[in-house]
Amino acid sequence: MIIGVMGPEGSYSEKAAKLWTAKYDLCSAEFRYFADIEDTLLAAVQGKSDLSVIPVENSIEGSVGITLDLLLEKDVKMVGEVVVKIEHCLLAKGRLDEIRIILSHPQGLAQCRHFLKKHFPGTELRSTGSTSHAARLAGEFEEMAAIASPEAAECYKLNTLLSNIQDQKENYTRFIVLKAGEKDPNAGEKDPFKQASFSTCKNSPFKTSLIVYLQKDRPGALYEILGAFAKRKINLTKIESRPSKKELGDYYFYIDFEGHSSDALIKDALEDIKVKVDTLKVLGSYPAFKK
């Protein structure tokens, strides 16, 4: 099995993939590295990987917009999730007083915004495709530093100048595990992931994720959708709007809730919702992450 992750080595995406594969006894999986979130997701769609692991939300900065957009645009299914504690460090080849440029993924820079403003007000900030890419670049130039993980420091033989520099010490990112959508209704029978892992989590609680689009907003439209869950006592774990990019004030809604789409109660709720919306895209049901 090939798992697509954001590269190069030492990324938080790789860390998430390692945690997830260890949980489901998929330690023989091979990791393949891609430049950014989009390339990593497309790897699964295009058959370059069997599964791909990408970030979807962070406890400080909220949802990752490009991930939400790609979930809508591409034919993928969510099969898992994993939450990783983020511990940003300032890494460099040289000394603290030599730093002229600080590199990181946009989320890494955003999660350390106040720290950077206070301690490096005049320093140039540059975005990279991943935190590990920033660390690799920092290893080539003494005037560059990277915001990345402790694992990246070890991987690229960098000095850890400062640890835990994120603005909130409790910093977590939720990653999702994706595969290509199944056009063949019998494809699941041949799916090596299902054979390898779902047999180990039959008794685990499940979550389901979906996207809905109302098309024509009207009073009570969203209330009707939420009511379909409420009257069946289905617990929502997340609801978020995302611009449709068609016109101002027009949104898609992303909803996560407890339960599996094969459950009779969930099936009933989805049938109820289907007639109330223009678009209903079920992204998948998967074992809920447990610490």
Image (spheres, rainbow, N blue to C red):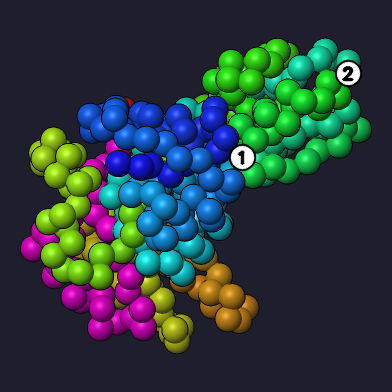
Where residue 253 appears, as percent x and y from the top left, is: 43, 67
210 vs 134: above or below: below
Using the rendered image of the protein, determine whether residue 114 is visible from the camera's viewpoint. Answer: no
Relative placement, left or right, of 236 versus 125 is left
Quarter holding residue 61 = top right
Where residue 219 appears, as percent x and y from the top left, is: 42, 82
Which quadrant of the rendered structure holds the C terminus? top left
Relative placement, left or right, of 201 versus 255 is left
Relative placement, left or right, of 251 versus 201 is right
The residue beneath circle 1 is 130
Residue 98, numbered circle: 2
Among numbered discs 1 and 2, the one appearing first in the sequence: 2
Where residue 20 appears, as percent x and y from the top left, is: 33, 34
Assess whether residue 193 is covered by the magenta stretch: no
Q: Label 1, secondary structure: give it.
A: loop
Residue displayed at 83% across by 21% down: 142
Where residue 234 appears, as percent x and y from the top left, is: 21, 56
Task: Give the amino acid at mark 1.
Answer: Ser
